[in-house]
Image (cartoon, rainbow, N blue to C red):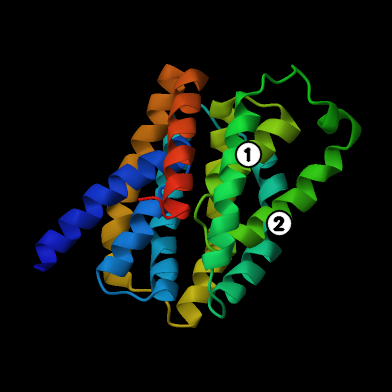
Amino acid sequence: MDDILILLLLFVVGSVAGFLNVMAGGGSTLTLPLLIFLGLNPTLANGTNRVAIFVQNIAAISSFKKENYSEFGQSMKMAVFTLPGGIIGAITAVKIGDETFKMILGIVMIAIVVNMLIPKKKKSEIEAKRPWLIYPVMFLIGFYGGFIQVGVGFILMAAINYLKSLNLVNTNMHKVFIVLIYTIPALLVFFITDNVDWKLGLGLAAGNAFGGWWAAKLQIKKGEKLVRYVMIVAILIMAVKLFGIV
């Protein structure tokens, strides 16, 4: 395939993936198969995808901040606990496969849909009684994100939404910051182990950044209702792909 066509394909798919990732999650179910289709082995595709995730979340954070949606202090308090998990997860990713784990993830995604459909109380009882719970949860999410990344946005949204009782727009505001932070050491691990294709990664990153930027702006304008609809559809699509139905 011609290099220009490859870059165009990466940009288009990356734009859709970036939009889904920032609005809900699951964009990596599009980008990882594309990178493998273009000739990368699964581990190299996993590492290359992190370049796009890194740039995408910088763009999303900038877009949120421009619309006066930012609480960097609160975001960092959660993000810092994902760092050790992200490093361990990335090291694990370069050593073992993930097929069984993806099947488990499909079940988890369905559970998250059900959770998001249940009306929430104004104040989370868990947050009031056990506010510390968010931190070990962030460690585990960091591990998963460093390991495979696919679907981590959904898991983060469920955790923040449930444990912190935030609306989905503010949840996403924190989510993109947290993912950016643990992606830094995870990407470094993949880079050190020579599992990053920078040409394809940067081509994909351009699309992810474009989609992520507009997803942040659109959800602020349209509100939580749009995020919920996009999220439910994205989770169902991802679950179907993980179960191998299509």
Q: Nearer the viewer, residue 69 or 228?
A: 228
Quadrant of image for the N terminus: bottom left
The residue to which callout 1 is attached is: 111
Q: Amino acid at mark 2?
A: Leu
How busy is the neighbourhood of tag 2: few (under 14 within 10 Å), some, or many (20 plus)?
A: some
Question: On the image, numbered disc 2 is attached to which residue?
Answer: 140
Q: In the rendered image, which quarter is residue 73 located in?
A: top right
Question: Can the viewer see residue 26?
Answer: no
Image spot of residue 232 (x, y percent): 49, 32
The kind of residue on which mark 1 rests is Ala
Q: Position of residue 238 (x, y in %)?
A: 45, 46
Quadrant assignment, res 116: top right
Question: Do we see residue 189 in this rendering?
Answer: yes
- Dot in front, 2 or 1: 1
Residue 156 percent across, percent down from the top left: 61, 43
Q: Residue 28 sits in which quadrant?
A: bottom left
| Side of 204 relative to 57 (left or right) | left
**What SS does tag 1 mark?**
helix
**Image location of residue 40, percent across then percent down:** 32, 74
Query: What residue is at 71 percent from the left and 56 percent from the top?
Result: 140
Mark closer to the chain start, 2 or 1:
1
Tag 2, which secondary structure? helix
Look at the numbered discs 2 and 1 and tell me whether their residues touch, using CB distance below 8 Å: no
